Amino acid sequence: MSRLNRRQFLDTTKNTLPAAAAGLTILANAKSARAYAANEKIMLAAVGCGGRSGGLTQGFIERGDCQFAYASDPDSARAEGRAKTIAEAQGSAPRVVKDFREALDDKSVDAIVSATPDHWHALSSVWACQAGKDVYVEKPATHSCWEGQKMIEAARKYDRVVQVGTQNRSAPYNMAARKYIEDGKLGEIYMCRIYNQKSWPNRDAVPDSDPPAGFNWDMWNGPAPEHAYNAGWHRYWNHVWRYSGGDIANDASHQIDLARWLCGVTYPQSAYSTGGRYASQGVAETPDTQVAVWQFDKMVMTFELTLYTAYMLKTDPVVRDTDMFPLWPQNATRIELYGTEGLMLVGRHGGGWQVFDRPKDRQPVVKDQMYGRFPDPEHKENFVQCIRDRKRPTADVEEGHRSALLIHYANISYRLGAQKVEIDPATEEIKGNPAAMEMFKRTYRAPYVIPETV
């Protein structure tokens, strides 16, 4: 069995991985505020101060070359809490604002870090690009198919770096897995299975009410349709259609993007999805049990979701940061690639990968393998270096959009009662299905609107 460790892979690919910027870089776009010295700090604005914001802000600060000038959230308590932790980490307090457009007006701000709910990802990114800011935006990139087209348009028009938070594309072990596949060592891959299985209990539905003090519900609701405040929707937005696409979008977007990248595919020919909300009723609208099938040229990709399976295990920090592999049969976020020359199992966010041959004497035969590490630092490094050298990042917005399309196509099929939808790769639209195309783009609520021409 051959084994490729992380250092060996980095040594053999050091000329192709992002290199550190040096000296001065003159930015191509006139709206860019200035050039960057190699040792100059990147000024950031935290947009959205919820749970994911904590890890993002801390990670950028720990680099030593980034500083947060703003902490923005419609919830004053959250914004002030995040500002406090940022101040403790970086030694200076960011300005607290409810409306992040104040940060966009500040020419000293270089980029935003958008950790908003899904329905704000595209709009925050487009507005930032229009203001001449670079963008780190959490996954999934979009809430609808059309939004991704506008994000790409804005990024290219204003010459902006837009990095989607799908860190697996910056992980050396995943780069090695992709090269292994490209070199033909797995043979031809005709089947790829993606899993997202865990426990996420429902919540009881609650009546509408007044928003909490200090919380700008109108801003938080943003581009979604007008509605009174609802605490259930606010706290469980990941599973409400108007704000997200369920856990296929919220969590499985990582595995879906990684699988699409490893397999080297872009647009599916068709998509189909079925399932339901079976385990419990409550505020959640999206399924707790879902199967999706995407047909590509000479390959089928499938997805399976369960949210009532507490015995399934997400890859924990010990496995992520040491030379260990997950317990594959019960790994909640694994990918299985079935090639003509072997079976590759891949874990996201540091799970590593192994390739299995036919068992011998009823014992596993591992042909090749590589341990992994959690790639958050590498992904931030790639983003910062792209701000300096103006290259496209590993998880460029166009790649994030294409992966999000798989999610949207599947959810459109599911919401139409498991109708199979056919895809036109030239337009990304769904062919011959007006009902499906009604969900291709959402109706925006003024003033939270992405324009037809960005």
Image (cartoon, rainbow, N blue to C red):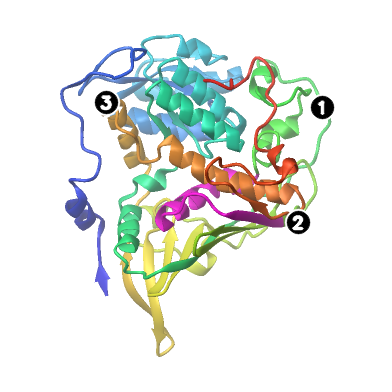
Q: Residue 90 carries which label?
A: none
Q: Which residue bears the numbered disc 2?
A: 279
Magenta-highlighted residues: 246-274
Q: Position of residue 408 (x, y in %)?
A: 62, 44
* Amino acid carrying mark 3 in the image: Arg
Question: Which residue corresponds to mark 3?
Answer: 388
Q: How far apart are marks 1 and 2 (CA)?
A: 24 Å
- Dot 3: what SS? helix
Q: Which residue lies furthest to the right in this view?
A: 207
Q: In this view, does 201 lie to the left or right of 29?
A: right
Q: Do the residues labelled 1 and 2 touch (CB within 8 Å)?
A: no
**In magenta segment, residue 347:** no
Q: Position of residue 54 (x, y in %)?
A: 47, 32
Q: Which of marks 2 and 3 is in front?
A: 3
The front one of 325 and 445 is: 445
Q: Is residue 47 visible in the rendered structure shown here?
A: no
Left/right of residue 55 with respect to residue 10 in the rendered view: right
269 in the magenta segment: yes
Mark 3, Cα crowd under 10 Å, few <14 / some 14-19 / many 20+, is: many
Q: Who's the residue at 35% across and 75% down the image?
A: 366
Circle 2 Cα neighbour tier, 10 Å, few/some/many (<14 / 14–19 / ≥20): few
**Disc nearer the start of the sequence (1/3):** 1
Amino acid type at circle 1 is: Asp
**Residue identifier under label 1:** 208
Residue located 18% across and 54% down the image: 12
Pointer 1 local density, CA inside 10 Å: few below 14, some 14–19, many at least 20: few
Q: Are marks 2 and 3 in contact (CB under 8 Å)?
A: no
